[in-house]
Image (cartoon, grey):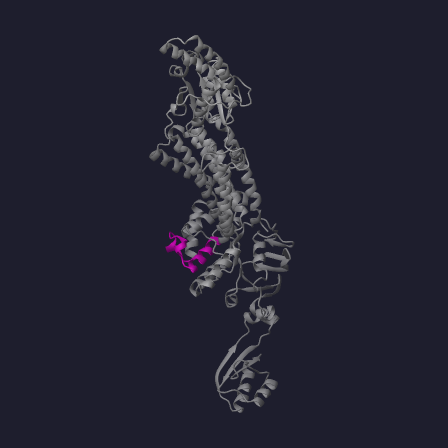
Amino acid sequence: MIRTVLRIGFLNLRRDRVALSLKFVLPVIFFSIFASVFGGRGNAGTARINLAVVDEDQSEFSIRLLAGLRNEKGLNVRTTAEGNGTGPTLDRRTAEHSVRSGDVPVAVVIPAGLGESFAKDGFTGGAAVSIQLLSDVSDPIAPQMVQGLLQKVTMTAAPDLLMQGGLRQFEQQAGAMTPQQKTAVDAWIPRLREQSQPGSTAQGGGGGMGVRVDVIDVMRSSSNNGSLISFYAAGVGVMFLLFSSVAGAGGALLDEAEAGTLERVLSTNVSLTGLLAGKWIFLALGGVAQLTVMFLWGSVVFGVPLFSHLPGFFVMTTVTAGAAAALGLVLATLARSREQLSGFSTILVLTMSALGGSMFPRFLMSETMQKVGLLTFNAWALDGYLKVFWRDAPLWQLWPQVLVLCGLTAVFLGTARMLARRWEAA
Amino acid sequence: MNVLTVSGARKSFGTVTALDGASFELRQGELLALLGPNGAGKTTLIRAIAGRVRLDSGEIRMFDRLLDGRHTPPELGIVPQEIAIYPLLTARENLEVFGALHGLQGQDLRKQVDWGLDSVGLSDRGRDPVGQFSGGMRRRLNIACGVLHRPRVVLLDEPTVGVDPQSRDRIYDTLAALAAAGASLLLTTHHLEEAEARCSRTVIIDHGKAIASGTTPELVDQTVGRYRLVSLRLNMPLGIADAARLTSEAGVDIDAADAKVVKARMRDVAMELPTLLDTIRAAGRTIDDVDVRGPSLQAVFIHLTGKDLRE
């Protein structure tokens, strides 16, 4: 008996390709995606951090500090508005704008007087003048990494200057050095200067001592409490929007085709184009309602700042829901049965959600994976929501996301209409 | 007057020929049965008339207007074989949406919805979701949705499949009322007795061709002839010699499954039956039961399409 039951199960599984792919292919796809995202397979590993540097000091120390930062392999340093070294030189205001707009996750401002303070006071000079690190804390990694590298570079870029400052402090506290001591120090300082040259692997010897760094969260400064939650609301919302759009489109077309109502409706005054347009509008409105409910809940329970970002929210929600509905129609017209649609869309939506940032932020991924993510629907939608809720971007700055999502909508609708020809007169 | 004329309709799907020159006509106010074995081409023909299948060749005219095979004519009402209604909607809501899709609106729509519910006996269930309905109720609503917009020609694909005799009667009453109001109806069915009893004419289609058409008497005359089938049940089987004599002289068949049953085809029962009874009594047998049957559409159908299973 059990053998017969096993045989029935085996035969059914063997002939159900969708079930087979869900069982064996989907886990492999997801394993590959996660391995690529976190393991850096097929790319240069962890992304280099884009860092904007503003040198207000223009001292020998600040110049050597900048050179040291440029020499760090984990950093991609820019001092001008454009990443390729063109454009006007960054100042504090434009650097902060770059962080707020998402061009860079971190900016370092070397304030005027830092070099002089170091030359005068050495290790303890930082107490008076500190480096400012402007950061976007939605990226929990980049600011920490830059802070650490700053400590390293201040030690290794100008050890001679630090030594001179330290000795000055020593002389103030303990009295002047003897001529012999001075000769020994003078012989040592050039060697320290040599060690600071680019390419040097010298390690700072300051132990726990180093330059003082003040971390300033430029996003929080505009009372953005709850914005990080809005990022997750958008991520989860877009993923479920895709699922519900596909399910809705499947119900709207495949179930109706199976039940015979599609044929019947097409035998009335409604054309296939009119029918698809009606289904699309219905699905899109449903998507808008779904995301609105989610953000309202987020607003009431988790403090998502929905009401202070209503225009941007409605722009992004409308174009996102429209594109998701159109994608749902493409998948529903592509599939031959509900089972096919269910299996195929599960794979596609989960893959897009993983790559596009719905499951974990794209800035955690390598540069290559971030670029691959841009091929997904989710990435553009989430970038738009991030601009609205996190970066307080004005509406016009949403144009790339709106343009791409509207373009995708047009392509999806055209494709769905073409695929739906199978329901036209045979 | 012909309201619908199908001439030389041909349609193939890949290597399968669905229609192979089918021709027939539907007359004003008649209820025409389109009969045929499974796979004969009935549904393809219905879909071609409905504008859902484009013919490879041949033509379909409705009210003398050539149909393009791409659009459903506005005078047409279609009742599909599937129960193509929305189960989560109420009966009234279903009628409202299909009426609106056919262009009805406002007061006219409300009036027709009330008429539709009444005509299929669902006036008291109009506000109930269709998902709670029995098969017969759904089937009746399925018909109402197809005729709500007062079509002059109605195509019904197996409108009574899977329903009880009460619902079937109600459905045919509805169709008769539509025909009496001037609509012309074409229906497919496998219930030959129904077609014989309820339809004014019959078209039999097989292998994509219309192979016979007419009233049942006309079809009988064209095919099996107007004989009666007489069956006699005897008290015991005939002896070999008597059976041989009856078979050769009176054209009698002995039932292969039951030797006590004797069958004969008679053109004039009043003249031929007494002679047969006398002969049997002379052979020492008594007659327990007599059954006389006239020629049926079933006999015509089997005569024309054979007994082989299809598909």
Q: Position of residue A184 (x, y in %)?
A: 46, 12
Q: Nearer the viewer, residue B13 or B112?
A: B13
Q: Position of residue A228 (x, y in %)?
A: 40, 31
Q: Is residue B208 above or below residue B276?
A: above
Q: Position of residue A150 (x, y in %)?
A: 45, 22
Stretch in magenta: B120-147
Q: Quadrant of the N terminus of chain A?
A: bottom left
- Residue A311: which quarter of the image? top left
**Residue A207 appears left or right of B17:** left
Helix, strand or loop: magenta stretch: helix
- How many labels, in total? 0
Residue B133 belongs to magenta span? yes
- Residue A182: which quarter of the image? top left
**Residue A424 appears left or right of B287:** right
Please give the name of the residue rendered at 53% of the width and 84% of the height, measured from the top-left corner: B259
**Residue B44 appears left or right of A168:** right
Q: Nearer the viewer, residue A70 or B4?
A: A70
Residue A138 belongs to magenta span? no
Q: Nearer the viewer, residue A220 or A308?
A: A220
Q: Position of residue B48 (x, y in %)?
A: 59, 54
Q: Is residue B200 visible?
A: yes
Q: Is residue B103 visible?
A: no
The residue lying furthest to the front in this view is: A180
Q: Nearer the viewer, residue A376 or B281?
A: A376
